[in-house]
Image: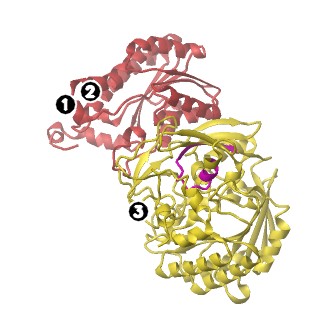
Chain colours: A red, B yellow
Amino acid sequence: MTQIMIVGATSAIAQSVARIYAESGARFFLVARDASRLDAVADDLRVRGAMSVECLAADLSDHDRHPEIIAAAFDAYSGLDTVLIAHGVLPDQPHCQESVQSTLDSLNINFLSVVSLLTPIANRFEENKRGTIAVISSVAGDRGRQSNYIYGAAKSGLDTFLQGLRNRLSKSDVHVVTIKPGFVDTPMTAHIPERGILWAQPEDVAKGIIQAIDKQKDVVYLPRFWSLIMLIIRSIPERIFKKLSL
Amino acid sequence: MADSNYTSWGRFPQVNQEGLPLAWRSDELPVAPEEGASVLPYGNGRSYGDVCLNRGGLVFDTRALDRFIRFDTETGLLRCEAGVLLADILRLVVPQGWFLPVSPGTRYVTVGGALANDVHGKNHHQAGTFGCHVIALELLRTDGSRQVCTSNENSDLFSATIGGLGLTGLVTWVELQLRPIDGPLIREESLKFSNLDEFFRLSELSDGNFEYTVAWVDCVSRGNSLGRGLFARGNHDAGPYTGRKRGEKPRISIPFDAPFSLVNQWSLKTFNSIYYARQRERKKVRTIHYQSYFYPLDAIGSWNRIYGPKGMLQYQCVLPGEDGRDALANMLQAIAKSGNGSFLAVLKVFGDKPSPGLMSFPRPGVTLALDFPNKPDVFRLLDRLDDMTREVGGAVYPAKDARMSAESFHRYFPAWEKFSAFVDPGFSSSFWRRVGGEVL
């Protein structure tokens, strides 16, 4: 039976993943900022078959609280076998260009807070010689674009951090999976008016995440066609790419 | 954001409306971004006409309010958010020995939509409407209030909200009493009838012993064949079952809009004749999965696309009493004569169990439902059908309507004035603006 910690448990993708685990009777330790939203998610998972759901409401930009959160998560069921990191914000790029503080805040939540959480979690898993760390990154980390590079930079930093972590932990049978969704129809992206064929539903992305965890994939693009799109985007020479308006 | 995704199932009328997704029941009711703009909750867009539309206004997209809150497997009491689909409920509760107390012809409606339209099903003669099984609900209104409504507490708002077409406020959650079952199967008997008298006789004979009854009627044939059809009656059954297992998703899907309506005189005649002739024996008995029994059309994704880009109109009326039987015959005659009509015209005799809903549609009598391609002469035909319905003191179902006059609506729903006192001043719909005002 899965014992899973989900950070950012009220995100649409995390909820969809959790519902699939709930049906197989998993035990959950959920972390998110808003306590009443967290309760709504917890109740839903209990009805759907979760064996147990523990919640902790916390603002993850406050790194000082991370050790306490992690201790509570590992103590809840005497150990964890999976950690899913799903929190993040989509910053307003033009606003970030005007405000250093907004830029740093978004880098803090999208990158530094993940590093701060995963450093002690990785050490525990390494010691136990088992566990899976799944992190929701983004296709935006594959190349910096004028429209979204603050978000992209955080995700790119995260990708490199996870690469190194994977390399290190593979010796201890700890599995690290980097998940790179494309456009997903969630509250985080609700303000984007255009909805084309590239957009995916969180339920479909969630199935891909579970598959990636089960099959011990290293890096997955979800839906899969994004790997091809990003291959093309990455292969455009920088002297041409810089002139594009992407 | 302007989004053409917010359409109704009949895809007529087509309107531009902004959608605002709501995801959390603990949030306050958002205020409309523009002063004076009205709002309307929108579920899964399965009502046919304009009760789910708010032209020029805002709709609250409630599909992300899709969480269960609690489910007592001993008593069958289920509380869930209003955007949960009936399909999600069935997936959860059927394996645990429970079933929806009332189900419409598709499982892809939200709980909020089922409540707001006070939907009915094949068991109306025994179970009444969906609203008869709603124990409690929570309502958010633009005055900032958050109220739990039951038959005892805020009971006026409770009965106004059941069948209240989403106009009394935003329903965040609903508590429902489910009914127990022994398994997912239905034992179905299908009987041929050759005229309306036989249909009514079969209904009288069956309604006591069968929980579910409904009939398909050939709405194309005239003369001696007028009112012929197939009567389907069923009960939950413990099995055994020998058929195929049904999947969750539609097996086939209409991938794009037909360039024009594929429903026309010729296709109708062919389909209706084949459908009647296909069953050779007078009575056929089979035990089938509940999905095949209740939701045959759910097996064809986006079937509304066969009507082409102009969409379709549904007409569902209830005709009470002895006069109603004559009116039904006259209607079928008028429909057959017009050459319009539908593949699946449905007949059922409603029971007399009252709904708590102030504006509920079902009432004792026979109900006829069928769809028409959107063509100019169809509007004239439907006006004639309305005349017949009015004459016998019947009613037309708002959930399926896109064209009834305000005058007709007031006749069908005499409680409408009392109801308007409960309409949230910030809420409105295309339907309500069309029928809820003064008769000019």
Q: Is mark 2 on a helix, strand or loop?
A: helix
Is the Cβ of the residue at disc 1 closer than 8 Å to that at disc 2? yes
Residue tagged by mark 1? A98
Q: Mark 3 lies on which chain?
A: B
Q: Is residue B195 left or right of residue A217?
A: right
Mark 1 neighbour density, 10 Å: few (under 14) some (14–19) many (20 or more): few
Is the Cβ of the residue at disc 3 closer than 8 Å to that at disc 1? no
Q: Which chain carries label 1?
A: A
Query: Mark 3 or 2, which is nearer the eye?
Result: 3
Q: Are marks 3 and 1 on the same chain?
A: no
Q: Is residue A236 left or right of residue B192?
A: left
Mark 3 and mark 2: span between their CA atoms? 39 Å
Q: Mark 2 lies on which chain?
A: A
Mark 1 and mark 2: span between their CA atoms? 8 Å
Up the image or down, B143 lies above or below A42; here it is below
Residue tagged by mark 3? B15
Q: What stretch is highlighted in magenta?
A: B158-176
Q: What residue type is labelled 2?
A: Ser
Q: Are marks 3 and 2 on the same chain?
A: no
Residue A45 place in picture, x, y as percent:
59, 32
Residue lying at 76% horizontally and 81% vertically, measured from the top left: B195
Residue B129 place in picture, x, y as percent:
69, 56
Q: What residue type is labelled 1?
A: Glu
Residue tagged by mark 2? A102
Residue B296 place in picture, x, y as percent:
65, 61
- Whether residue B63 is visible here, answered yes or no, is yes
